[in-house]
Amino acid sequence: MRIKAFTYWLTCLLLFFAAFAHAEKGKKQPAAIARDSSAVQVRQFSEDAISTYSQSDDFKYAEANADTELSFWQILVAWLLQMLAAEVGRSPIFLVILKYLILGLILGGVIYVILKAVGIDVGLFLRKGSKKTALPYTESLENIHEIDFEDELDDAISNRNYRLAVRLLYLKCLKQLSDRNLIQWQIDKTNKAYYYELTQKPQREAFGSLTRRFEYVWYGNFTIDEQAFNDINGLFNKFREQL
């Protein structure tokens, strides 16, 4: 038994040394690095070429960036995007949508200012229909030269429809201004346009005050009582006496 065990361990040891020797034999020796003996030619940058390139607009990166100034709207949009990016985790899709939303709002604001400046009533596109009240007069449709104001006013007052009566007072005021050639009445003109047509400042300010009261009652859908109507009617009578 001892001889068999000795033979077994001796065989394992010989196999181990044989495998180790084979592995060492299989290792490649590192290749020798050849020395480069070729001549080296040192080249220098051309000062003339550098001077030529430095004067070319295609290579003036700093100056080109300095001449590009951001507009106020670009700065505003960039600031808003930076503020919101910190809140939403800088989501690319959200920022793209938000960018065009902000630009749309800015564009809408500019269009609103332009429309108001030229005297177009923006409320025409926003105001709801008059389904709630059966009023015979609608904005920009009545011809002031075809209305019998005395009969219509008497009828509105007798029915205690003071809101309609204020409307009729204002239309009557426009007709009086048109008859005296103080305004050029047109069926699709806005109240703001008539305001700017009045050349005398006191007259224009008085008309502006009447316009605000009329728009408050008519477009604001506010119901007024008899006392409030009498006060407004007194202001219209006073303005008529000043014409």
Image (cartoon, rainbow, N blue to C red):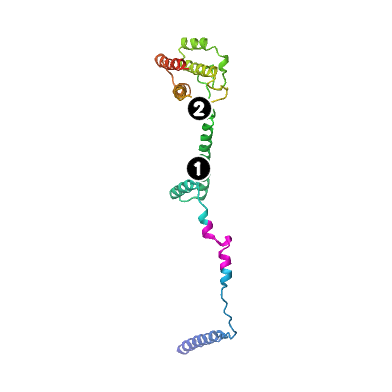
Could you tell me which residue is drawn at 52 percent across and 32 percent down?
A: 117
The residue tagged 1 is 102
- Identity of the residue drawn at 50% across and 42% down: 102
As shown in the figure, which amino acid type bears the numbered disc 1? Ile
Instruction: Determine whether the residue tagged by mark 1 lies in a helix, strand or loop.
Output: helix
Magenta includes 128? no
Residue 176: % across, % down: 52, 16
In this rendering, the answer to whether 225 lies above or below 113 is above
Magenta-drawn segment: 51-64
Q: CA distance from mark 2 to mark 1?
A: 33 Å
At 47% from the left and 89% from the top, the residue drawn is 6
Judging by the rendered image, the residue that carries numbered circle 2 is 196
Q: Is residue 230 above or below residue 37?
A: above
Count of numbered badges drawn on the protein: 2
Looking at the image, is mark 2 or mark 1 nearer the viewer? Answer: 2
Which secondary structure is most common in the magenta stretch? helix
Element at label 2: helix
